[in-house]
Structures are given as C-alpha cells and as structure tokens.
Amino acid sequence: LKVQDGCDYFCAYCTVPFARGRSRNIPVKDIVAQAREIADKGIKEIVLTGVNTGDFGKTTGESFLDLIKALDGVEGIERYRISSIEPNLLTEETVDWIASGTKFLPHFHIPLQAGSDTILKEMGRRYDTAAFAHKIDYIRNKMERPGAPKVFFGIDVIAGFPGETDGLFMETYNFLKDRIRPAFIHIFPYSRRKGTRADLMKGQIQDSVKTERVRMLEELCGELHEEFIRSNRGIHEKVLFESSDKDGKMFGYTGNYIRIERPYDAGLAGKIVDTVI
C-alpha cells in the first residue's frame, strides 16, 4: 500500500527528488479506506511503501504515527510491515507505540548507506553512526524479550561511494559486523548519476574495487542472516503461508521475516499458523 511519494532530502548520490518531486501524500482517511478495500479481499498483511515513507504528512499536516495508528484499527488486516524508513524519521515515540502491542511487526528496513561518519557527511545523510546505533539499540530494547522473536533489521548499504578509501570501507564493514549485526544487508555498488553532487566528486572508485567490496558485504550478510535464524530457533511464531504450490511445498514468513517451508496444504494458504521455528 503506497502511502507517500517524492523526497525532499537530495542526498548526494540520488536522482529521486528530481525524478519524483517533493514529498507528498494523500490524507490518512483515504489510505485507511484503501486498506479496508484490501481487507475486503481477504488479504491479511499489508506492506506500507513510499519513496520516503517516514516523511508522510507533508501535504496534509498529519504524521506517520497518525497514519499507522489509524491503520492499526482496520478490521481484517492482521499484520503490517513498514517497507523502508529513514532512521531519523523512525522516532522513539513511534517505536514505543509499535512495541505496545499493535499489528505492526518486528521487522524494520532502515537505510544506513555507510557506517563511516566521513562518508555519511559527504552523502548528505541526516544522522551519524552514533545516532543510527542508538536507534537500533532502542528498538531492540523495546521489542525483544527472552523467549520472544528477535527483531529483523534489513539495512541498506552503498559500496564504493566517491572518496571511500579502503579504511573508510572497513569502518562500514566493522560497524555492521561488530556493532549493528543486522539480519540482512541490502547491498548496492555506488552508481554514478548525472545531475547529482556525487557525480562531480573526486575519488571515483574503480568498478573492480566496488565488486570486491560488494562480495565482502555479501559474505558478511550470509553469516549474519544464518546467525539471526539460529537465534530464533525454538521460538513460537506466527507464519502467514502463501498460496503457491512449489514442487509440493509452500512457504510463508514469520512476523520477523524468517521464511518457513512446509509440505503444501491448500487449506493453509492465506492463513496465519502458530509455528515453532
């Protein structure tokens, strides 16, 4: 369910504000009406999407928290995910409300882009590594309990931004490995775009170097994802199974986005099932 479009941030590497325009949205009441239409089709889970989702409200004077509180009351929808939200826009007030017992799942997709304060500043990002780490810690402290599911964090990272020396790249690598330890890393080699500030920056990185950095991060991602799954073993979770029959098997996702496989059973398609991971 798309709730927002456009972006006002103008990060150094990004053409989205030029292509998609300024941040804007339709009113909460209209989005709630769309969610009710989705519920009427028997759909149980909605993923909220946008270009800069957490910036919701610029057009209408509402807030992202106003939106998710209203959506939480839609009958028939049992689960919500937030597709991607900037760390500075995922407020502690929002986290507190989600953690209080809502339909919003322990699954967050949060762009980091770099784990180096030097690179973050060059990118024009609106936080530093200390603020990012604090936000992750805050969410974990609010939402994780012994015997309960761990929070899934998917983290966006750009490898090979102009001026990213080997040492600065290792700051990002080590920040992810030693400090954040997300469940998944979405990795992008820096792609030069005309009209952006980064296109004119000195220190453009060779493709071969970007490729090697992507490889290192992919390897780290594999290790972290396996660790995340192990940390959830034995925990009771609810799985929403999909309808597709894939060679006699069906798949579904836990609230914290672990993919579960079982023999195909048409009676479970679209159902939320109690499962021990």
Image (cartoon, helix red, strand yellow):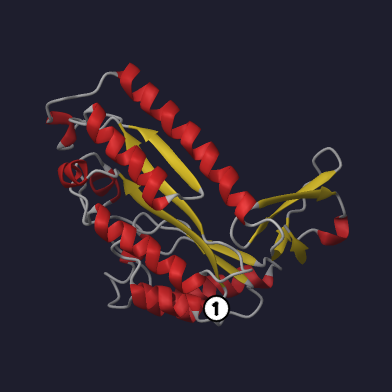
Closer to the camera in the image, 50 or 225: 225
Q: Is residue 101 left or right of residue 189?
A: right
At a point 63% along the width and 80% down the height, the residue shown is 75
In the image, is 60 to the left or to the right of 97?
Answer: left
Pick the residue in front: 135 or 192. 135
Quarter of the image where one finds residue 156: top left
Q: Which residue is mark 1?
A: 102
**For this rendering, which residue is in front, 191 or 231?**
231
Name the side, left or right, on which 56 lies relative to 233.
Answer: left
Question: Does residue 139 sit above or below 51 in this rendering?
Answer: below
Q: Residue at x 73, y 54 (%)?
A: 242
- Taking 50 as reference, is 79 above or below it? below
Q: Position of residue 103 (x, y in %)?
A: 57, 74
Viewed as shown, does residue 93 lie left or right of 258?
left
Q: Position of residue 121 (x, y in %)?
A: 16, 46
Considering only vertical position in the picture, is 172 above or below 149? above
Where is residue 140 shown, x and y percent of the image? 46, 66
**One can see residue 271 in this view:** no
Amino acid type, label 1: Thr
- The residue shown at (46%, 75%) is 68
Residue 51 visible within the image = yes
